[in-house]
Image (cartoon, rainbow, N blue to C red):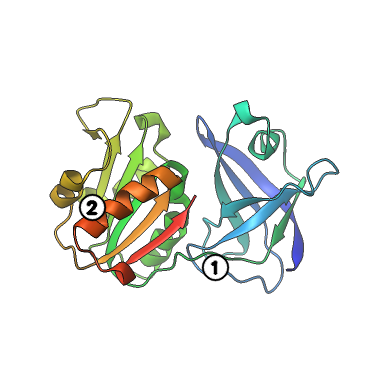
Amino acid sequence: MATHTVRIKSIEKVTHDVLRIVSDKPSQYKFEPGQATSVAINKPDWKSKKRPFTFTSLPGDDHLEFIIKIYPQHKGVTNALLQLSTHDELLIEDPWGSINYKGEGVFIAGGAGITPFISIFKHLKAQNELANNQLIFANKTKADIIHAAEFEKMLGDNFINILSDEKTDQYAHGFITEHFIKKSITDLGKYFYVCGPPKMMKAVEDILNNLKVEKEHIIKEEF
């Protein structure tokens, strides 16, 4: 698999623990909305430490963008990203990933699992094809919601949030359950796009199986 060197153009925090990194885009580099790549920091101690990150830019953009949740306590790659600045370099490989848009449906994300859906929703908006797609986004607290304002503006009432560790008047509280899904959506015949931590993915997939959602209508990617 080819490795490409890209220079960081900008780096900033978008929430208390999420970075937005924009880099150059290699010539002829192509990906589909929802895909990811393996990324490493182009420094001697980090070149071999690849991590999967999803493109949150559009395929037609002249740059690459990544929205990355950081874990400073782990002292790993995401923590090292905090130390980078413009003109530092990343190493990226060719794109991969199993989540791609097949038709109108319900997107269910947990935490950083939202990232494949950012590019997909950006693409749908650019094509005027948002239609009646819904997004169910599970987080611990309100402060953890990535791109909250953007999704609210884009999706309106089709942007549905649930928080496990914080009670607010604005959002549901708890975890995604069968009752919550049945209450939140109107059509079980649509596609279901699921991305998040393995435990959350397993729970949601079990719920969808119980609701008799066709297996070929469940598109998933562990994050």
Q: Quadrant of the N terminus?
A: bottom right
Measuring from the top left, give residue 133's x and y in whole percent.
27, 61
User: Can residue 103 be seen in the rendering of this structure?
Assistant: yes
Which residue is pictured at 49% across the width and 49% down the height? 223
Q: Can residue 129 be seen from the camera position used here?
A: no
- Residue 62, given in percent of the width and then of the height, sits at 62, 64
**In the image, residue 154 lies at what x, y percent?**
31, 53
User: Residue 197 appears in which quarter of the rendering?
Assistant: top left
Amino acid on which the number 2 mark rests in the picture: Asn
Bin the neighbour count of mark 1 within 10 Å (Cα to Cα): few under 14, some 14-19, many 20 and up: some
Front position in the image: 3 or 221: 221
The alpha-carbon separation of the residues under discs 1 and 2 comes to 25 Å
Q: Residue furthest right?
A: 44
112 horizontally vs 139: left or right: right
Q: Secondary structure at mark 1?
A: loop
Indicate the quadrant where residue 11 lies. top right
* Residue that label 2 marks: 158
Q: Position of residue 213 (x, y in %)?
A: 23, 64
Numbered tag placed on residue 59 in the rendering: 1
Q: What is the secondary structure assignment of the residue under circle 2?
A: helix
Front position in the image: 175 or 92 = 175
Earlier-in-chain disc, 1 versus 2:
1
Looking at the image, which residue is at 37% across and 55% down? 194
> Which of the two residues, 145 or 106, is positioned nearer the viewer here?
106
Position above or below: 127 against 112: below
Q: Is residue 45 left or right of residue 72?
A: right
Picture mark count: 2
